[in-house]
Every structure is written in C-alpha cells, then in structure tokens.
Amino acid sequence: MKPKYFLALVLILTLSVCGTLFSCADVGNPGGEVNESEIENINTNINIDTGEDIMREDKSIDRRIIIENGEFKAGGKKIWFNGVNTPWHKWNDFGGGYDDFWWNEHFKALRENGVNSVRVWINCNNDNGAIIINDAGMITGASQKHWADLDKFFETAERNGIYIMATLLSFDHFKSGSAQRWRDMLASDETADSFAENYVTPFVNRYKNNPYLWSIDLCNEPDWVYENPECGNIPWEQISNLLARAAAAIHENSDILVTVGLSFPKYNSDGPGSAYEGNKISDEFLQSLYDNPNAYLDFWSPHYYDWVGPWYGVPFYSTPSGQMPGGWALDGSKPALIGECRAKGSNGETQGTENNTLITDYENAYLNGWQGVMAWTSNGVDGNGGFEDVILATNYMAEKYGDMIFPLD
C-alpha cells in the first residue's frame, strides 16, 4: 500500500471512531459523558450475517404478558394478539431437523406484516424421540438436541419480537407411532407426574425468563383423545388429570400463562343444552382430579373450523361468553382468544354469515370481545391457507389497531 493511501485510510478510520464516540456520548446526555446505565437499557440485536439491526428494545420495559382485570397486558398496556399458527416447519422440528435460519426469516416477515404472536408445536408426536418416554409411560427427560434447538428458537423469537404460544403435546401423540406409551402416561398419577416433573418443569425453568414465551398450550385438541378410537378413547378424568398436574407445575415455577386449545366448545363450556357436555378444563374439574390450587388455566383458546358453525355459530361474529346463538358460552371470568381458524377465512355458506374474509373474521372477533385470533397457518402446512392469506388480515389489523397490537413500540 502506498504511504499516502495508508495515511488517508488512518485519517478516515480515526474520524469514524471519533464520530462514533461523540455520537454515543450525546445520547441522552448533553454534557458529553457516556451514561452506561442508559446504554445498557437499549438492546440492539444485530444479524451477524447481514449486519442488519433487526430490533431495538428498551430493556426497562417489562414485556411479559399478564392478565389484569380480564385483559391481556404488556408493560401495563392492553395487547391484542394479531396472531398465526406456524405449528412446524419440519414436523417435530425441535430435536429433529430444526432450521434456525428459516424460523428467523419467517418471524421477521411475519412481524413486518403485523403479526405479534405465533403458536408453535414444541413436539408434534415425538417420532423424533425428543421427549424420553419408556414402555411404561414414564418420562425421564428430553434429548440434548431438543433443548439446544429450543434455546436457539426462543432467542430467535425474542430477537424478532414475536410472542410464542408453545404447544407441548397434541392428540397426534396418542394416535400412531409410540401412541401406547403416551396412553400409558395418562394411566396413573405417577406417570402423569413424570411428564410434569421431568419435562414441563425443566422446560419452564429453562425459558421462563424470556418474556416472549408468553403462554403454554398444554395439548392441542385433547378432545380427540377422548372422542376418537384411533387416539384411544381415553376418559376425560385421565386426560384432565395430566393437564391439571402440568398446569400446576407451570404456575408453581413461573409467571407463564397456561391454556388448552380444544377443537370446539362441547368440552370447553358448562352451557345449557345437549351441545355441551361440561367444561373439562375448568378450575373446578381440574382441581377435583388434582387437589392443588395451582391446577387451573389462565385463559381459553378454542379452535374454529367450518364444520363447527352449524352446531355453535361462528365465534368471530359471536361473543365468547354469551349464550347461543349470539355467544360461545365460555366462562366469562377468563379472557378468550381463537387459537386456530382457517387462514383462508371462514366459509359463509356453512354458518349463514355471508361474504366473510379473514379480514372480517379478525376484525369482528376484536369487536365482539375476543382478545386475539391465530390463523392456521402462516406457512401453508395443509390446505387451510398460508402466508399470503394471513397477511391480508394481519396487515389490516395492524394498520387500524396498531396501538393494541404493538403497544410497546
């Protein structure tokens, strides 16, 4: 390198460093001295590959979701869950084929299109053996790769400002593969406790300090475990006993909120008439099986698909707690959101509501007192729709109701 070019480079670098120092010193401090406490309150997450500043957060704000006076709040402000389901990228991602780059890019795209929350299946049916369960239904822990993948995943969610509803189990566990082991896990207090003590509790303690793990859905649609022969026709007393013990473990170890996503209101309500068979996840039912005051759910998150409409009406155009035909008859003492629905929107032909779109579904859910909607899916895992369908509604809601979707921005 020629001397004059070397000297020019040194001068440029010196000016650049000095400019950076003066710029830092000026932040919130006209006296020119760097205030370390102020700098520490700003968290800048840099994408190492691109140098992109993905998100800046004021660390002084508590971003943990709580329930106050029947409403979800973050940092003291009401939040509405403009959500989606991204249940998996690769079936049984965590401890399987987890791709952190894909999740990061997908979360980034979702947030850019108004999404603030995502429901993800932490374990789909355990075909990857991530949760260690023996022939007697006893759970002893999880694989190291399962934890390592989840470590990256929750960092990625936090970096992108995406709140996660983590679904730990599904009716799929009881349907095929190692289904008999999972059915045996429901058979006794001892085996149910092994799930709560050796998997749920370590999961909670590992990630409870990340405010973006806002809730845990204990099991996806356990009503099919009761209803369907292919899932074992397991009695509700055994299913709900497991849910009670897992819920208590979460509440005893963290502030993470707990729910169970049932497929329809039949087992999620004590409403009148033959359409309801009693709330199998109520505080009273759970605690009748497990005598522990921490055995309760914090909110309801029922699912909705078109086949449900003729029986219970369309939730978007009904209130959560009113009686049919104008409501879904849920216990109004807890907040409620819609945990699954078609990303392509509800089909007006089957429920008597015309010209429905996902936009009108989301907005009417908001207007009728539901505190969030999470469409299935953001990544097109089946025929119910994908990213291009979802973002029509999430962008609309974020533009119109942004103060409650991103209340801390």
Image: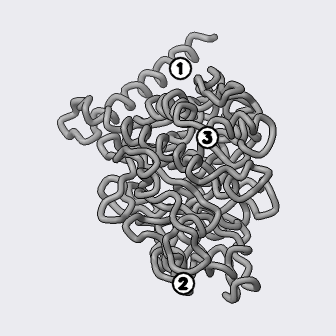
Counting other residues with Cα less than 10 Å from the Cα at mark 3, is it few (<14), some (14-19), or many (20 or more)? many
The quadrant of the picture occupied by the C terminus is: bottom left
The quadrant of the picture occupied by the N terminus is: top right
The residue at the point 47 percent across, 65 percent down is 336
* As drawn, 62 above or below 383: above
The quadrant where residue 347 appears: bottom right
* Residue 58 placement, left or right of 265: left
The residue at the point 38 percent across, 47 percent down is 64
Q: What residue does disc 1 label?
A: 9
* As drawn, 349 above or below 307: below
Counting other residues with Cα less than 10 Å from the Cα at mark 1, is it few (<14), some (14-19), or many (20 or more)? few
Residue 76 position in % (x across, y down): 29, 57
Looking at the picture, which amino acid does disc 1 mark? Leu
**Real-space CA distance between mark 3 and mark 1, rounded to the nearest whole angstrom:** 70 Å
* Residue 398 placement, left or right of 403: right
3 or 1: mark nearer the eye: 3
* Residue 208 placement, left or right of 97: left
Of residues 59 and 34, the one nearer the viewer is 59
Check the image and tell me how it is coloured.
one colour
- Is residue 139 visible in the rendered structure shown here? yes
Which mark sits nearer the N-terminus, 2 or 3?
3
Residue 189 position in % (x across, y down): 52, 36
Which mark sits nearer the N-terminus, 3 or 1?
1
Q: Which mark is residue 186?
A: 3
Secondary-structure class at tag 3 = loop
The quadrant where residue 268 appears: bottom right
Q: Which mark is residue 324?
A: 2
Looking at the picture, which amino acid does disc 3 mark? Leu
- Is residue 51 visible in the rendered structure shown here? no
The residue at the point 76 percent across, 34 percent down is 178
**Real-space CA distance between mark 2 and mark 1, rounded to the nearest whole angstrom:** 75 Å
Looking at the picture, which amino acid does disc 2 mark? Met
